[in-house]
Structures are given as structure tokens and as C-alpha cells.
Image: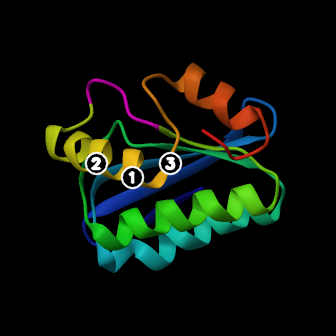
């Protein structure tokens, strides 16, 4: 399933067992927050752990980060796993803001798809 906003594209798939992977392509800002929230919420409501792949992401703003933080908390409340995939190839501005945000909020971050899926598969939403 894919959702397009003016600047970025959201691609969602359920794979790796019960883990939903949401890939953010391009730039993501406040204009796409509703779509992102809906895609992640739908996965969580269907009892899927979630990995958000930020590898193809070139920009995120504070509202998008807010969705990621709230989604992580919702996953924890539901007893589901949640992780961000942030490979070394992720755009520098995205990596920088995530380095600051993840540490302050406890967002679980992995460098590879395999590691992110393993984190999310643990099923408790904890880092």
C-alpha cells in the first residue's frame, strides 16, 4: 500500500511475520502527518509491530517526529514492538535530528532492516 503527499511517499507492507514496514521516501513534513499517522495506526490496530524505514527519507520536520514518538508510545501501550530503521545511507539532516530525538525520547533505532525487525519483533515496544 502506498500513500503520496506533495513532497514524500509512504510505502507500507506487512512482512517478516507480523511486522509492518513503513518506508518514508523523500521529504516529509506537516502536510503528510495525517497520512503517516493513519498508516502506522492501521498497522498497530491490526496487531502488527512496526518498523519505520527512514533510509530513503531526505527530510523530516517536528510534526513527523511527533508522530513517530506518539506511535512508539502507542505500540508500547498495546504490547507491540516499534523501531526506526536508520541506515548509514540516510540523509545527514535526517540522521542528525534523529540522533537528538531518539536519545531524548527513547525511540529504538537500528541501522539495518534485520536489526529493526528483530527489535520490533520483541513485542514490547521497548528499545
Q: CA distance from mark 2 to mark 1?
A: 6 Å
| Residues marked 3 and 1 touching at CB (< 8 Å) | yes
Would you place residue 62 above or below residue 82 in this image? below
Residue 69 circle label:
none
- The segment highlighted magenta reads 85-89
In the displayed structure, 125 sits above or below 68; it is: above
Quadrant containing the C terminus in the rendered view: top right
Q: Quadrant of residue 46?
A: bottom right
Nearer the observer, 61 or 4: 61
Residue wearing tag 1: 104
Residue at left 48%, top 68%? 67
Q: Position of residue 18 (x, y in %)?
A: 80, 40
**Which residue does the image show at 31% across and 60% down from the upper left?**
8
Residue 43 is at least partly visible in this image: no
| Side of 9 where 84 appears, left or right | right
**Dots 2, 1 in contact, CB < 8 A:** yes
Mark 2 nearby-residue class (10 Å; few <14, some 14–19, many ≥20): few
Q: At x 37% / y 66%, what residue is drawn?
A: 64
Q: Is residue 87 magenta?
A: yes
Disc nearer the start of the sequence (2/3): 2
Overall secondary structure of the magenta section? loop
Q: Is residue 86 visible?
A: yes
Q: Residue furthest front?
A: 104
Are there few (<14), some (14-19), or many (20+) residues within 10 Å of tag 3? few
Instruction: In the rendered view, tell whether residue 28 sits above or below residue 50.
Output: below
Image point (25%, 40%), residue name: 95
The residues bearing labels 2 and 3 have C-alpha atoms spaced at a distance of 10 Å
Residue placed under numbered mark 3 in the picture: 106
Q: Secondary structure at mark 2?
A: helix
Reading the image, the residue beneath label 2 is 100
**Quick one: which residue is furthest to the left in this view?**
93
**Quadrant housing the N terminus:** bottom right
Amino acid at each position: 500500500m502506498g500513500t503520496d503527499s506533495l513532497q514524500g511517499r509512504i510505502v507500507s507492507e506487512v512482512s517478516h511475520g507480523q511486522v509492518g514496514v513503513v518506508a518514508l521516501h523523500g521529504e516529509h513534513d506537516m502536510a503528510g502527518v495525517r497520512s503517516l499517522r493513519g498508516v502506522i495506526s492501521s498497522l498497530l490496530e491490526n496487531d502488527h509491530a512496526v518498523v519505520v524505514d527512514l533510509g530513503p527519507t531526505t527530510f523530516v520536520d517536528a510534526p513527523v517526529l511527533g508522530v513517530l514518538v506518539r506511535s512508539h508510545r502507542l505500540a508500547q501501550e498495546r504490547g507491540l514492538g516499534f523501531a526506526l530503521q536508520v541506515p548509514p545511507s540516510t540523509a545527514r539532516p535526517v540522521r542528525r535530528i534523529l540522533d537528538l530525538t531518539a536519545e531524548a525520547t527513547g525511540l529504538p533505532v537500528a541501522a539495518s532492516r534485520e536489526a529493526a525487525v528483530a527489535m520490533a519483533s520483541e513485542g514490547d515496544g521497548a528499545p
